[in-house]
Image: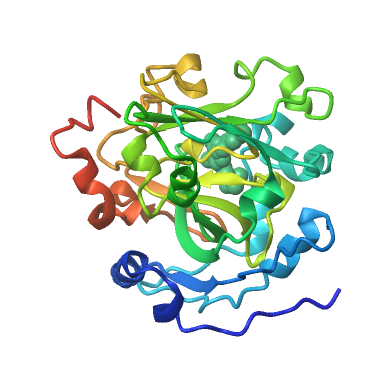
Amino acid sequence: MARYRYPRIPESEVTPRELFESRRRLLRGGLALGAAVVAPGLLGSREAQAWQDLLEERLSVDLPSRELADGESLTPRRDITTYNNFYEFGTGKRDPETYGHRLVTDPWSLTIEGEVDKAGTFALEDVLAGQRLEERIYRHRCVEAWSKVIPWVGFPLADLLKRHGPTSRANHVIFESIHDPDNLPGQRRSIIDWPYREALRIYEAMHPLTLLAVGLYGEVMPNQSGAPIRLVVPWKYGFKSIKSIVRIELVEERPITSWQARNPDEYGFYANVNPGADHPRWSQARERRIGESGRRETLMFNGYADEVAHLYAGIDLQQHY
Ligand code: MTE
């Protein structure tokens, strides 16, 4: 299918100043934000279309250079989509690719509730209507000491949260993945207490680096990568970046997340990438970049310290990992 390509728009014209400036900082840090996509009025009300068709049009972005500033390069799409953690499909790295077709992504709705002025359940196409999508190239570091560099397409989670008006008691944001044991073979096993559940502090959720991603490599999100909408928090271990989200709840008290419930000694709430704080069963000092030979040094906050270290001033990150 021929896809409409949006004309390239100078980023300085379409990117909010805050993001544009952080992009320049990020480029120095070895990663880039790509072309922003502006699609005002694209989701016209004339006809209802399958949201995937709309997304396919909207995700036709020009990818930026494959070479990143400090010698890192994008992980090939094939490696990004054939080596996955998505336990709803099983614990094998290839299970998500093998069984991914069983995930039903259309229709999809997102419930937003709790400490917000505007709670409700919304069709995904309405969540995305008028939303500016942009490409962000982020490092992605799993707690298991492997990593990738991924060109996500998405939008800041803050955009969505602001639209729903968090109340003054909204200190934490909980995310929940789809629960569909009939179609998701892993959910018929007691790997975790399903559904997969994660959470962030509100200031982490509102941080401009925190994305809701709906695609990668300029295309609609592959099922195994967390279709149709997933979280991406690049300075934290990958298990925080919950896939296939159906529910977001803003709450006052800090909740217990899936991995904490399963093993609190191994998986902390913050889960910030930290080469100086080893996992009880392995070192976090180095990582295996998928598609490369050898190992790389792991960077504090996964290389995003300039952007996020201030969030944790005064917190002992060895104790509160
Ligand atoms: N989200 C859900 N719903 N289920 C999962 O099993 N795995 C997490 C995270 N999000 C997971 C999830 C882990 S451990 C990692 S490392 C990343 O997704 C992996 O993302 P990727 O497969 O796109 O690399």
Q: Is residue 16 visible?
A: yes
- x 78%, y 22%: residue: 181
Query: Would you place residue 281 above or below residue 219 in this image?
Result: above
- x 37%, y 47%: residue: 235
Q: Quadrant of residue 139?
A: bottom left
Q: Quadrant of residue 40?
A: bottom right
Q: Position of residue 35 (x, y in %)?
A: 51, 75
- In front here: 153 or 7? 7
Q: Position of residue 188 (x, y in %)?
A: 76, 18
- In front here: 37 or 153? 37
Q: Position of residue 114 (x, y in %)?
A: 49, 25
Picture colour scheme: rainbow
Does residue 27 appear to the left or right of 320 in the view shown? right
Q: Position of residue 39 (x, y in %)?
A: 62, 70
- x 40%, y 72%: residue: 71
- x 21%, y 39%: residue: 312
